[in-house]
């Protein structure tokens, strides 16, 4: 699996991170033209779910335990995973939430988007309340886009929609297999997010239609030449740094008492003796590790330098494949680390990234053009909002 560094496209948050790989691309173009709609908020959640590869152990599934990220990664100390908000309760509109050029956005439309967000993310009512104005703005942008498509007379054919949808489906399933080593059905994945085939098809239809409108207005999409230029000017974006794949056993210490640390160290020494004496590392981790990764046999996936706290990183990168560390102390407690794979720095060739890079540049150009286009539609539109209809 190839990982890119954080060189950025102009105006884009991050050049294709090959850890999230084409999975982000799969839904990106579906969502691209509608990225400010509530439907694409769900698609964005799909992107987040896809990009949470085990290669970057930001948060272990179903984990209450800390992950051992470096504080320099995001400007914060490597924290214990935050507890998930309790579900229950919601907000609802009791009347129209907005009017766009005389067309009302109904309570049903607003409530439908809230329900999808709630089902996917289980957001607490107070957060939904804070998001209500953004949901309304999303729906306004969606209505403006729909009106523009209707007025343009552009009508993508069923064949164009089918072809684009099949492209997304194939890319999704191929990338899921590469990332997770298992087959994930695109249609089932979308259905689990509460999005119907009709909604996906409508999104694809709108994406193709808006692309046609923007191209008719003079948008020129980047091609291979532009991709080659970007590749040449941003070599760091196509260099995968040294990585290790590791698993660990944590004896957690939630105290500053030296006696507690010594007791934990002795426990870690006993576990170390077991795994170096022939006991299966994964089994010992499942039974004894005080970390959410225990259920996966302590597996933390693959990571590069700068992803983990310094003590953990230094120990992990000093190990050879299958070597087991002595107990290592960090702010979380005592770790016993085993490296299962190593990979050296690698520079990706242009041919290996050409297709995805061209898509990424194309997506960026389309997003920027769409942003300008929607802003213009807003300036020319008659828009009223009715936040008082939300309870």
Image: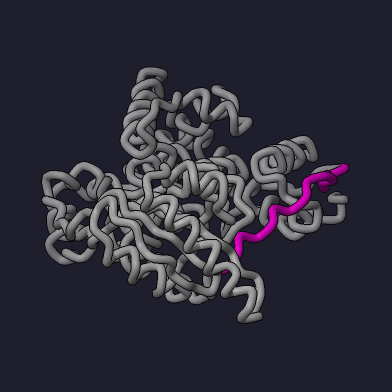
**The furthest residue to the top:** 159
| On screen, residue 290 above or below 156 | below
The answer to which image quadrant residue 238 occupies is: bottom left
Q: Main secondary structure of the magenta part?
A: loop
Residue at x 16%, y 64% (from the top left corner): 235
Q: Examine the rendering and report whether any part of residue 286 can be seen.
A: yes
Is 89 covered by the magenta stretch? yes
Count the numbered circles shown.
0
Residue at x 78%, y 56% (from the top left corner): 129
Is residue 78 or residue 50 the one in the foreground? 78
Query: Percent from the top left, x then y, of residue 206?
Result: 48, 34
Q: Which quadrant is home to the N terminus?
A: top left
Q: Is residue 11 left or right of residue 151?
A: left
Query: Percent from the top left, x then y, of residue 330?
Result: 49, 73
The answer to which image quadrant residue 324 occupies is: bottom left
Q: Is residue 83 left or right of residue 51?
A: right
Is residue 100 or residue 86 the one in the foreground? 86
| On screen, residue 63 above or below 268 | above
| On screen, residue 317 above or below 30 | below
Residue at x 67%, y 43% (from the top left corner): 117
Query: Percent from the top left, x then y, of residue 228?
Result: 13, 54
Q: Is residue 362 left or right of residue 277?
A: left
Q: Is residue 178 left or right of residue 300?
A: left
Q: Examine the rendering and report whether any part of residue 219 can be seen.
A: no
| On screen, residue 95 above or below 257 | above
Is 91 covered by the magenta stretch? yes
Residue at x 30%, y 49% (from the top left corner): 340
Tell me how the rendering is colored.
one colour
Is residue 120 or residue 340 the one in the foreground? 340
What range is drawn magenta here? 79-94
Query: Percent from the top left, x then y, of residue 305?
Result: 32, 67
């Amino acid at each position: 699996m190839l990982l890119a560094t954080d060189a950025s496209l102009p105006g884009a948050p991050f050049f294709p991170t090959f850890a999230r790989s084409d999975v982000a691309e799969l839904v990106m173009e579906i969502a691209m033209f509608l990225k400010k709609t509530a439907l694409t908020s769900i698609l964005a959640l799909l992107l987040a779910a896809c990009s949470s590869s085990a290669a970057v152990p930001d948060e272990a599934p179903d984990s209450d335990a800390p992950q051992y990220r470096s504080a320099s990664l995001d400007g914060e100390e490597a924290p214990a995973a935050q507890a998930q908000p309790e579900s229950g309760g919601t907000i609802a509109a009791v009347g129209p939430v907005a009017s766009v050029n005389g067309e009302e956005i109904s309570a049903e439309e607003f409530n439908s988007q809230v329900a999808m967000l709630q089902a996917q993310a289980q957001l607490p009512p107070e957060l939904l309340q804070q998001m209500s104005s953004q949901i309304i703005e999303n729906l306004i942008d969606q209505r403006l886009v729909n009106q523009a498509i209707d007025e343009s007379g552009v009508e993508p054919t069923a064949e164009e929609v089918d072809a684009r949808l099949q492209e997304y489906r194939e890319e999704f399933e191929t990338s899921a297999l590469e990332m997770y080593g298992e087959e994930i059905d695109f249609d089932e994945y979308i259905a689990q997010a509460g999005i119907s085939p009709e909604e996906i098809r409508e999104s694809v239809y709108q994406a193709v239609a808006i692309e046609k409108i923007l191209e008719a207005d003079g948008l020129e999409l980047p091609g291979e030449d532009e991709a080659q230029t970007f590749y040449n000017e941003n070599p760091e974006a196509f260099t995968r740094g040294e990585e290790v794949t590791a698993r660990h056993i944590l004896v957690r210490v939630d105290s500053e008492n030296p006696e507690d640390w010594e007791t934990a160290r002795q426990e870690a020494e006993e576990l170390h003796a077991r795994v170096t004496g022939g006991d299966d590392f994964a089994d010992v981790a499942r039974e004894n590790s005080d970390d959410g990764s225990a259920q996966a046999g302590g597996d933390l996936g693959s990571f590069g330098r700068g992803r983990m706290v310094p003590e953990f990183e230094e120990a992990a990168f000093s190990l050879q494949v299958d070597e087991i560390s002595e107990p290592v102390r960090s702010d979380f407690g005592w770790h016993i680390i085993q490296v299962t794979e190593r990979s050296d720095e690698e520079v990706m060739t242009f041919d290996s990234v050409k297709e995805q890079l061209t898509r990424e540049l194309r997506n960026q150009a389309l997003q920027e053009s769409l942003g300008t286009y929607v802003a213009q539609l807003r300036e020319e539109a008659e828009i009223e909002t009715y936040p008082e209809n939300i309870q």
